[in-house]
């Protein structure tokens, strides 16, 4: 699982899905599905929450996702207005 903060979630997920940076963590481990996200109005609050989630165990993170997305569906298409990107780059 990858946890991060961004000011533009659609752009950031697109970059991960298209391997914009082929040496980054998400490209190396084929992490392409957006399965959970939270929205904050203040960057500082988002960074604090990111650190809380990063300090959770894997089981705790899975439990967090299960509460809102028990099927671990990719949430990107709904967020991006139906724009589809291949799961793996060509």
Image (cartoon, grey):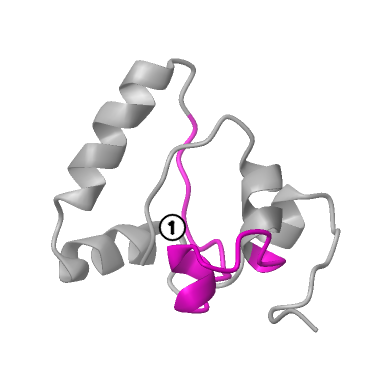
Q: Which of the 4 image quadrants contains residue 75?
A: bottom right
Q: Which residues are magenta?
A: 17-39
Q: Which of the 4 image quadrants contains residue 7?
A: top right
Residue 71 appears anywhere in the view: no
Task: Indicate whether 72 appears above or below 79.
Answer: below
Q: Which of the 4 image quadrants contains residue 73?
A: bottom right
Query: Residue shown at 44%/38% (left/top)?
Result: 5
Residue receiving disc 1: 68
State whether the magenta stretch is mostly helix, strand or loop. Answer: loop
Q: For this rendering, which residue is in front, 27 or 45?
A: 27
Asked if the stretch drawn in magenta spans residue 21, the answer is: yes
Query: Residue shown at 71%/56% (left/top)?
Result: 14
Task: Describe residue 65's horizontal placement relative to residue 80 as left or right.
Answer: left
x then y, percent, for residue 85:
80, 69
x then y, percent, for residue 28:
48, 76
Query: Residue shown at 63%/54% (left/top)?
Result: 13
x then y, percent, for residue 83:
86, 59
Task: Describe residue 11's horizontal placement relative to residue 84 as left or right.
Answer: left
Residue 11 appears anywhere in the view: yes
Local crowd at mark 1 within 10 Å, few (<14), some, or many (≥20)?
Answer: few
Task: Describe residue 88's horizontal placement relative to residue 51 as left or right.
Answer: right
Q: Secondary structure at mark 1?
A: helix
Q: In the displayed orientation, state which residue is furthest to the front.
A: 23
Query: Residue shown at 43%/71% (left/top)?
Result: 70
x then y, percent, for residue 59:
18, 70
Asked if the stretch drawn in magenta spans residue 47, the answer is: no
Task: Indicate whether 82 appears above or below 70.
Answer: above
Task: Describe residue 88's horizontal placement relative to residue 3 as left or right.
Answer: right
Task: Indicate whether 72 appears above or below 78.
Answer: below
- Of the 4 image quadrants, the one containing the C terminus is bottom right
């Amino acid at each position: 699982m990858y946890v991060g903060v961004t000011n533009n979630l659609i752009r950031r997920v697109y970059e991960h899905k298209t391997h914009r940076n082929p040496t980054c963590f998400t490209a190396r481990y084929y992490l392409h599905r957006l399965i959970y996200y939270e929205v904050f109005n203040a960057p500082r609050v988002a960074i604090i929450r990111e650190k809380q989630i990063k300090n959770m165990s894997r089981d705790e993170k899975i439990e967090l996702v299960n509460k809102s997305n028990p099927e671990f569906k990719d949430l990107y298409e709904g967020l991006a207005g139906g724009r589809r990107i291949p799961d793996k780059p060509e």
